[in-house]
Amino acid sequence: MKSSPIGLLVAVALGIFPAQSWAAGKGKAAAAKDSKGAAAASATVDADAAPAADATTTPAAGADAAAAGGDAAGDTGDEGGSETPGGSGLEDICKIDPAACPNLDMDKEAARPLKEQIFAVQQAYALRVRRLELQLGWSFSLNDQFVSHPAPVLALNYYITNVLAIGLNGAYYAPFNVDKSFNGQVRRAARVSVPLTEYQWAAALNFTYVPAYGKFAGFGDFIFHYDAYVVGGVGAISVRPIPVIDPDNRNFSFEPKLAFNAGIGLRIFFNRWFAAVMEVRDYVFNDKLENLTPGVGAQASNKATWYGETSLTNNVQAQVGAAIFLPFSFDYRLPK
Amino acid sequence: MTTTKQKTFKRLVSVLAAALALFAFTEHAQAQQILLTGPLAGAPAVRKLRLHRQGRFEFAPAVSFTLLDEYQRTILLGARLNYNFTDWLAFGAWGALGSAIRIPTYLTDQVQAVNASRRTPAADPNSLDRRLTAVNLGPDFKKQLAGIDWVVAPQLTAVPFRGKLALFQSIYLDTDLYFFGGPAFVGLTERKNCGSAGEASCAGNYDTTQRMAIAPTFGLGFTFYINKWSALGFEYRGLPFSWNTGGFDTAGSGKDKKFPDNKITNDDRQFNFNQLLTVSYNIYLPFQYRVSE
């Protein structure tokens, strides 16, 4: 009976031992907390340990670098774990085939300079290549002080490479145009009418290029990833003048115009498939404005007299929304 | 309240409670996941962080551009001076002059073109347009426009987000995202009040005067550190206050004082959410930064 507690302790110790070695082998926490420990572990295997060093040498790369170091240490653990139970497996190999017996001078190996390629940003958080991005958002005008043009927007982008995508986007403005009270005040105060335009919809074929990505540490506590992109394309925007000069006689119809667009955007990733998007884009098109001179008599109802000059218009829209990447997961094949 | 309404209300409360519970549950579970299974549990999020701000002065010559202007765009030349107590908190001030560069908008050109055509020698000085705009339009509309002369804004800056940026996988920059706020003292040129008792008549009197407005100012910005002691800054600022940008009589009589009263008064000042974009070149003193553990 007296020996039974000892037996139980041994059994518990035996049960714990494999788990301990697995944890030590995985070594992520150890790598993060104690780089010396990680370096010591890496000496038994080889260069995968380099990212562990990165955890201490690359500022602001803590989490990723440490994670990379953790992976390296994990490899160490797996190999160590397979040999340890066998006991003298290495000696057996040396006895059978001395040529295959590893003969390394560990001091020399440890002193050898490491020439691992270290990337400043270890592994992009979310790969985009061969993924479909669905963007949903709300846009509002930044440069039209007379008529605001808010609209829901939808965009689909397919990433041909990790940095280049082709896609479509569309916005529906029709029920949301707002003719501001400022226009009425100017008309009343200066007796000057300014031609106004409202939008119906816009659609475009776009190319997106992602030249920049990075990460932020929030309050020194958590890390989130972001990327910045430029976008440009060609499409159409359906517009018509709001009759202000002769609203009794003039009734314009929407007409699509050729529109070019260019913009920049920022995506903040919440996880590897969901991100918040902020974008500013300029839609440029030739707008046919209302004729500032009202027609007289029968001419007033003659549509040919309703339109005046043509003006190159910049519709600068800011957009906020969300992006969903499909499929939700991906295989990482880039070098660390 | 009827029984049907009570039932509907109870259902609504139940749905809201369930939704709140779901949100709370999700957030809680996520936090647990990090604490229990994260390989870096207990480790700091960032090691060896370059502390670009802590204990350093920031002097940043800056150019600011107003946005969504009705009659006149202003380019303000100025600077920002901050002292960073920590890497995430700074106190300082931004100041700028706006009287040097002002660009009229297309609307201003249009108004002045029409205004000038009404004042040609051949035009009837007693025409309906001339009579109805006598209070509002002087010979040169551009001279009666309001403008921002100067701004001084003491402000507190918080820097909650600090990170880095890879550009084309070949240029790497430390960055931060900051938020700021404080009171702003704004020097304005604006059309002088007229038409009230003891004041000159507004017709033929389109002079401007100067005043100071006090307004809140706030915004956010990005800093891209070029080297140990300098950085590029991009900033968005809101500066809301009421002013009479066109020098027009738009309010003062009728219901809610929303109709013209043939006077220029404080009622004619319209609330504007003035916005500015600023580009700056930041210099940090001393030149050397500290590095965290």
Image: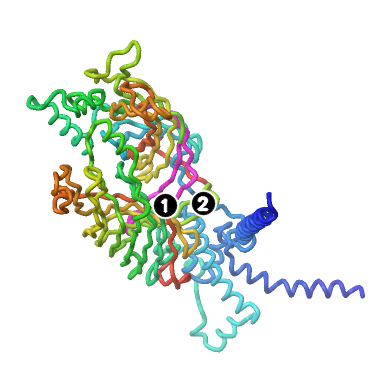
Quadrant of the rendering where the C terminus of chain A is positioned: bottom left
Residue type, label 2: Arg
Give above or below for B86 relative to A265.
above
Dot 1: within a 10 Å radius of its alpha carbon, few (fewer than 14), some, or many (20 or more) residues?
many
Label 2 crowd (10 A; few <14 / some 14-19 / many >=20): many
Secondary structure predominantly adopted by residues drawn in magenta: strand
B230 in relation to B8, above or below: above
Q: Looking at the image, do the residues carrying marks 1 and 2 touch, with CB atoms under 8 Å apart?
A: no
Give SS at disc 1: strand
Q: Which residue is mark 1?
A: B164
A296 displayed left or right of B199 = left
Q: Tell which of B168 and B14 is nearer to you.
A: B14
Asked whether B171 falls inside the magenta stretch, the response is: yes
Numbered circle sitting on residue B47: 2
Q: Which chain is indicated by disc 2?
A: B
User: Is residue B74 visible in the rendered structure shown here?
Assistant: no
Q: Going 57% across and 86% down the picture, which residue do you hit?
A: A95
The residues colored magenta run: B151-180
The image shows residue A121 at horizontal and vertical percentages of 42, 58
The chain ID associated with circle 1 is B
Query: x and y percent of residue A31 in the render?
Result: 56, 61
Residue A140 on image: x %, y %: 36, 50
Q: In which image quadrant can residue A180 be found? A: top left
Q: Nearer the viewer, residue A171 or A320?
A: A171
Q: Which mark lies nearer to you, 1 or 2?
A: 1
Q: Nearer the viewer, residue B232 or A315?
A: A315
Mark 1 and mark 2: Cα distance apart in space: 13 Å
Q: Specify the farthest residue to the right.
A: A1
